[in-house]
Amino acid sequence: MRFLTKQIFFKKTLICVAVLMSCYFTAQAQFHFGIHGAMGVPANEFRDATTANGGGFGLSAFFPFDRKIPIFLGVDFGYMVYGINNNRQRINGTISVGNQVIQTIPLDYRVTTTNNLLSGHLVLRLRIPIKLIQPYFDGCVGFKNFYTRTTITDETRNNSSFNNNTNPFNTNNNAYSNSVTNLSDVALSYGGGGGFMIGSGPIRLDVRCLYLLGEQARFFDRSSVAGWSVNFSQNTNQFDSNINLSSAKRSRTDMFYAQIGMIISF
């Protein structure tokens, strides 16, 4: 319950501030929208706890105080995956009348567990107004949300040996079967860094690197989920697993965060 309360507080606070900021600054000067590929590398205590690097994407929006002042206030959201575990399992479903089994059906499932990092920051940016290459410096405060999710996908439809690729146990009539969030925790995140906007038109190349300190959080990494298995119970039509939540790691969440992408000016 404490983890859920922290997560809701950080997210609602950031969303409220972003909405108010947007309402105020939209009427001011032009603003910048960014889309980036992103990479996260653990640092300090976080690096001692895990060697998994993250990869994903980021979105940002920056609003200037005034056209004559090169100071921007913005919001930055990022999503990264820092570990995936895939395995496939085949079970035999049975159709019975009373105690008599009249048919056995092979059912194929793919079990995917992903370790994810969702982050959001308020950013104060100072930009140096040079024409071709514009350096900037950022200060950030926000949150990091670590969560691990397991998804079960029904792939029996790919088995042409049974009833025209139709699985009678898949009542949703699609490939998705079930999913669960195994663990979720939120940590305060803050830090700074800088980058370069390269170009002179409305679309510019953007290269950025941040050092983000982070409070402690519980998380799984790639090594944690490597040995997980999921078993299907035919009687209850549910999946059971050997996931041990007590094996979750806990440390500070300092990291280097790098981005490359483009900035669009409006």
Image (spheres, rainbow, N blue to C red):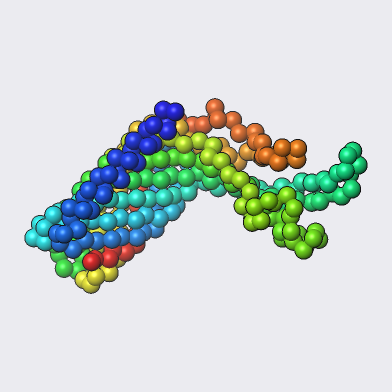
Q: Residue at x 23, y 72 (%)?
A: 201
Q: Is residue 112 left or right of residue 107?
A: left
Q: Tell me residue 196's x, y (percent).
A: 25, 60
Q: Is residue 244 left or right of residue 39?
A: right
Q: Is residue 182 left or right of residue 197?
A: right
Q: Tell me residue 48's x, y (percent).
A: 44, 35
Residue 151 in view of the camera: yes
Q: Tell me residue 266's x, y (percent).
A: 23, 66
Q: Foreground: 157 or 56?
A: 157
Where 123 falls versus 260 (above or below)? above
Q: Tell me residue 228's x, y (percent).
A: 63, 38
Where 150 falls versus 157 (above or below)? above
View extreme (bottom): residue: 201
Q: Residue at x 69, y 55 (%)?
A: 155
The picture quadrant where one finds residue 67 is bottom left
Q: Residue at x 31, y 60 (%)?
A: 34
